[in-house]
Image: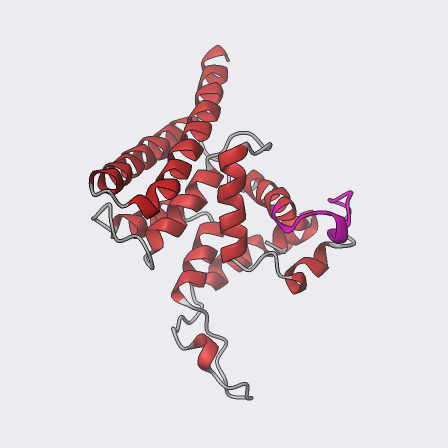
Amino acid sequence: MRLFTDGEAIRDYKDFAEKRIEKLPVSDNHYNQHISEIAENNITDLEYKYLYFFSGHFEMIKSWCMEQRSPLGWSGNFIGYGVDLLLLYLYADNNLRKAGKKIAVQVSNRMGFNESNNLVFMKENSVFETEVSTQKGEEIFWSIFCLWKVNYAITVDDMNSYVKWLESVIDKRIDGIVGGKYRDKYNDVALLAAALGEVKEGTQHCFELTKRK
């Protein structure tokens, strides 16, 4: 995401970064390695999938989500992360509404984006009018996310296809949670339903604009 705060860096390194990501070594022992001259710079499976998302491999993200066939048992599996990422990607409006903001906070926290060492590099960037000390980390995250989205545009048809797929997944999740009376998950599925509703409103507006053209 550092890459997408600077136009020149995007032009010079975007293609290189995408190709490099495909070759990154993945290991679940990443955080257990001792720092040494021979230590490998591995990343976790989740970090790898995040990088794949930010490299525009959205069909792969969907495929990884579809590995979870049950509407229950999302905890600890990628589908919860992937659905949140795709909801934000499909958000047509740069101004997040209530549910979208909560999803963005979840994603930025999971990525460790709010940690001060990940925000320092933003402080002098002209993209932002407010310094880090007076601007919430999730707001900075969404600002950069919107910059990133410009470089990975989606057609209206593809947008509708992803929305329909998400609707199917989220509806099954709601049915499973409510039908099973898993009350501790009611708020989670309510948030997904609300965020999907906000996304659908935005995509419908995009579709209507396309028809007028």
Q: In terms of depth relative to the viewer, which is nearer, 67 or 80?
A: 80
Quarter that holds the N terminus: bottom right
In this orientation, does residue 55 appear? no
Main secondary structure along the magenta-highlighted residues: loop
In the rendered view, does 133 fall on the left or right side of 156? right
**Point 34% across, 59% down: residue:** 76
Count of numbered marks: 0
Residue name at image x 45 percent, y 13 percent? 211
Q: Is residue 136 magenta?
A: yes
Q: 164 or 10: nearer the eye?
A: 164
Position in image of residue 179 (x %, y %): 20, 38
Q: Is residue 176 visible?
A: yes
The picture places residue 44, in percent across and down from the top left corner, at 42, 68
Left or right, 59 with reference to 150: left
Counting from the top left corner in percent of width and height, residue 87 is at 44, 39
Looking at the rendering, the stretch of residues picked out in magenta corresponds to 125-138
At x 46%, y 35%, the residue is: 90
Q: Point out residue 6 in the picture as x, y percentages from the top left corner.
A: 69, 50
Q: Is residue 207 above or below residue 11?
A: above
Which colour assignment does the render follow?
secondary structure
Pick the residue in front: 174 or 22: 174
Q: What residue sits 25% from the left and 38% below the top?
A: 178
| Residue 93 image-quadrant placement | top right
In the rendered image, the residue lying farthest to the top is 212
